[in-house]
């Protein structure tokens, strides 16, 4: 299956929190979008890996993803080495996306920046035909995405561009809240974590609203780039 966009996340819920509305908009525009989670989030303070699996499947249905896979790397301990790069390369070559979106280039959680560099490196290496990979006994052909973008997570990294996601924020919030074990619930007996507070839940809207304010729309999501952003004409800017 060839996808238009392939989104990677170090943990289930990364992509929903950071770019869920953008994904929902691209799918509504007719793009095929898939997701690959690197870990099951098994070190998370709240819930279990098995519950996160179920929540990730629910979120995928809400967003309308064409496919979602989990590479089952070790949460907290995966590294940017050859073995992990090859597994990511297999996913890139399997789905042959034009656009790859990866974790934030810098963030509070150590897995996020590590995943960002791992996926970025794998995107380059995936285009080298002398690196051989295969799935189910079938040799894969080299493939390099046209562009690699990075979403923004906990830290307020200044975006290189933003996407107007007005009209899609409700889908994003629904997909995020599919992870019921992870976020604010005043009746939960689980330990309180930085993302399980009322403030964090409200930040999903107010951070998107602030970016929207800056571009004269209601909501927006921001991304950073690895090369200059190019437009075919000034009329494509909003």
Image (cartoon, rainbow, N blue to C red):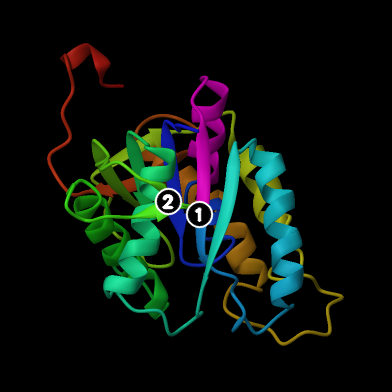
> Which quarter of the figure has residue 125?
bottom left
Q: Position of residue 180 (x, y in %)?
A: 76, 64
Mark 1 element type: strand
Q: Is residue 34 left or right of residue 8?
A: right
Q: Position of residue 109 (x, y in %)?
A: 42, 77
Residue at the right extreme, as displayed: 187
- Determine which of the numbered discs, if any, sits on residue 148 in the image: none
- Residue drawn at (30%, 41%), measured in percent from left and top? 141
The image shows residue 141, relative to residue 76, as above or below, that is: above
Residue at the front extreme, as displayed: 137
- Front one among 13 and 74: 74
Residue identifier under label 2: 91
Is 21 covered by the magenta stretch?
A: yes
Q: Position of residue 99 (x, y in %)?
A: 34, 37
Q: CA distance from mark 1 to mark 2?
A: 8 Å
- The reply to whether the C-beta atoms of the residues labelled 1 and 2 are less than 8 Å apart is yes
Residue identifier under label 1: 36
- Residue drawn at (83%, 78%), measured in percent from left and top? 188
Q: Earlier in the sequence, mark 1 or mark 2?
A: 1
From where the camera sits, is residue 125 visible? yes
- Front one among 74 and 107: 74
Mark 2 element type: helix
- Residue drawn at (27%, 41%), measured in percent from left and top? 143
Is 177 covered by the magenta stretch?
A: no
- Front one among 128 and 205: 128
- Residue drawn at (27%, 72%), measured in percent from left and top? 82
Region in magenta? 20-35
**Number of marks present in the image shown:** 2
């Amino acid at each position: 299956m060839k996808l238009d966009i392939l989104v990677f996340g170090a943990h289930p819920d990364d992509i929903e929190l950071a770019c869920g509305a953008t994904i929902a908009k691209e799918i509504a525009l007719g793009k095929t979008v898939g997701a690959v989670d690197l870990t099951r989030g098994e070190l998370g303070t709240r819930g279990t890996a098995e519950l996160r699996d179920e929540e990730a499947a629910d979120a995928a249905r809400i967003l309308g993803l064409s496919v979602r896979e989990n590479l089952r790397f070790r949460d907290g301990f995966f590294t940017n080495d050859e073995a992990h790069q090859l597994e990511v390369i297999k996913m890139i070559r399997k789905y042959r996306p034009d656009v790859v979106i990866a974790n934030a280039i810098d963030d509070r959680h150590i897995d996020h920046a590590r995943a960002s560099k791992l996926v970025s490196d794998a995107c380059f290496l995936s285009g080298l035909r002398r690196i051989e990979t295969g799935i189910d006994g079938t040799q894969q052909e080299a493939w390099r995405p046209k562009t690699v973008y990075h979403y923004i997570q906990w830290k307020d990294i200044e975006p290189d561009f933003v996407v107007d996601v007005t009209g899609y924020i409700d889908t994003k919030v629904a997909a995020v809240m599919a992870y019921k074990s992870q976020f604010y619930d005043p009746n939960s007996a689980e330990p309180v974590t930085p993302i399980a507070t009322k403030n964090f839940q409200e930040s999903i809207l107010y951070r998107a609203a602030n970016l929207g304010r800056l571009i004269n729309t209601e909501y927006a999501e921001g991304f950073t780039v690895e090369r200059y952003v190019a437009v075919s004409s000034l009329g494509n800017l909003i």
